[in-house]
Image (cartoon, grey):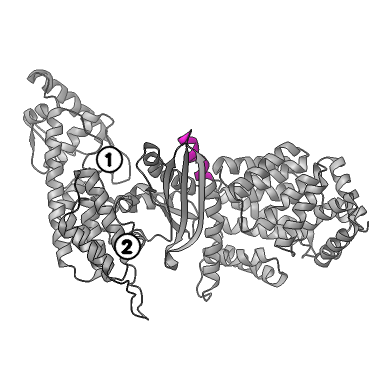
Amino acid sequence: MLVRLRLIGQMEAWSLTSENILPTGRKTRALLATLALASPRPVLRSKLAELLWSRRGEEQARASLRQEIHRLLEAMAPLGTQVLAINRDHLALRSGTVWVDVDEVLRASPTNPSALSLLDGTLLEDLDGVDPSFDTWLAAERERLSDRARDLAETLLREKTDSESVIPAAQQLLAIDRTHEGAWRALMRAYSGRGERGMAIQAYERCRAVLAEMLDAEPSDETQALVAEIRSTAPTKPPVGTAPPPPVPRLPLRASPLAEPRETREAGRAEAAKPHQRGGTRVGVLPLQLVGTSEAEAHLSTGLAEEITSALARFRWMFLVASSSLARFAVQARDEVSIRRAFNIDFLVDGTVQKAGEQVRISLRLLDLRAGNRVAWSRRFDRPARDLLALQDEIAAEVVAQIDPEILLIEGQRVAARPLADPTAYDLVLRALPLLHRLEREPFMEAGELLRQAIGQEPDYAAAHAWYAYWQMFLLGQSWTTDQKEVLAAAEAAADRAITLDPQDAKALTIAGHVRAFLHHRVREGIALHERALTVNPNLAMAWNLSGVAHAYLGDVTEAERRVRRYKQLSPIDPAAFYFDTAAIIVALIKRDHEAAVQAGRAVTGMNPNFSAAYKPYVAALGHLGLASEARDALRRLLAIEPGFTVKAFIASSPFDRVEDRDHYAAGLRLAGLPD
């Protein structure tokens, strides 16, 4: 095989070396598709001319055909050999040179049905309107393909007897024919048999909506009688001790990568685009359920899902399943179990959208599919419906900024809960992060050892180096080292190594920026790295926060406030808020708004009393306000963490660019009672 042709959905043509050789012109594509669907039989030139230029005279049509043959030969030129067999009367694709997805579907059988997974779209959906004659031919080809696939899917469904196998078989048939009432009834019975009466009734509601939309019809008497029976039956539960069925893996169509299903290929490309990725979480976003049928809801349903998927793809440690690949589940029963089986997804974003007057309400949730579809995060957005595109961008930004740390936290807890046997570097990093953020000395030191092990195990794993630099910042900030110079050098080396290994990792870039600004006092260099991080991923809340701190170091309070506000808008309840919300104390202190600094200081030190950096601006603000009692208490807690901290130590480590800001900070510390 020299060429892989995908004709189901939007047309694609790839060489064996993954070079895109799809012709640019629609007529040229239609010519190639016609030959592919006829292969290995040759097609008469006269038939092709009539099919593609039915409104032209015979001579003019033949001349146009000669031009398109030339263009097709140009498109196939990179193959370096003849794929087309051309003579005076006929055209054909040479036997054995082209793999065509339609051929695989037509060859599928009850004993080898896996090719049905390729049927996830309409045949040549981007070639409607090429010519009236071609449209008629294409409609017949679509019906031929659909009939063959439906017959096979019906056979497969009839062979299934238990609920667990009926559900995916019924969903496969519904992916081919959404109006197939027999499949809907099989799905309802299977859910009911599993004790999931709510899912069975939901399947009926989806069936009724599809029939009304596509056929302007109601469900048959048989279907309505079945749902009435299910509704009248008392809910049942599976027997105690019944274990859930094991996940059913997707079987590849064949060993060759040219025969992979589209969603598998897309996931593979996404992973290939992420260098040095040693692990990651698979996430999918379903098109939202519509509550109502307004144009705004229909637009947001798919548009927002795609926007969230694209935004999540910027986080290097996540693998995203294309929203379009999940779309068929959105129009069926939205069965999370089947989604996990089909795509091996760990987390699924789902939700609803509805419009009421001039407002749009969007409710979203993050489901942990490995924990029995537990809701790990949820949020409701009520926004004006004036600019729907801006609304999509705004909500997608906030959703991904909040989901990223939540998933990271859950993954860390999951890894920590199981024995540390033959861990990957990714596992070691995940195990380290919760220990790091506890800021208890012994677990914190264990986190550092885990990160060192991750680097030793896989020296080119960028994320491990980035988090190790992050750990070094805390090590120095907490004064838990006796060799500050060594830590400074180690932090810079780890940060630089991370961005060298993966210059598109936004987290690594912003961590490197904070190392430059906070530890090495090269604030402008740090800001440049933060800006690069935000270019790579404008929804990374960490980058907005740490870049805000860097601008505070420069004395640019207005810009610092803007960036810290953006961080808080993106991630209002961050799992590591004790660290990031410290920025608000620093900005308020530099602004000389001591009341706001004290208010923020009380909140932040209450979240994690072990974080020394939060006490310092808080104590300084208390000193300026003359709140002696509170200042003594906060200073006592600070010195319990850093016994050797003095005003002189602060000045020596101060990253503030303006002398007046550093002196104001130091004066507050003195007023609070910190010794020089």
- Name the residue that disc number 2 marks: 199
Residue 6 shows up from this direction: no
Residue at image point 26% right, 71% down: 193
Distance between mark 1 and mark 2 Cα atoms:
33 Å
Q: In this view, does 214 lie above or below 231?
A: above
Q: Give the range drawn in magenta.
A: 386-397
Residue 45 relative to residue 575: left or right: left
Q: Which element is circle 2 on?
A: helix
Residue 195 relative to residue 99: left or right: right
Look at label 2 and name its amino acid. Met
Is residue 197 rendered magenta in the image?
no
Residue at image point 46% right, 47% down: 362
Residue 179 shows up from this direction: yes
- Name the residue that disc number 1 marks: 10
Mark 1 vs mark 2: give the one in front.
2
Q: In this view, does 563 lie above or below 619?
A: above
- 153 and 117: which is toward the camera: 153
Instruction: Give the image location of residue 49, x and y in percent.
Output: 11, 27
Q: Which element is circle 1 on?
A: loop
Residue at image point 92% right, 58% down: 673
- 479 and 327: which is toward the camera: 327
Look at label 1 and name its amino acid. Gln
Residue 242 relative to residue 675: left or right: left
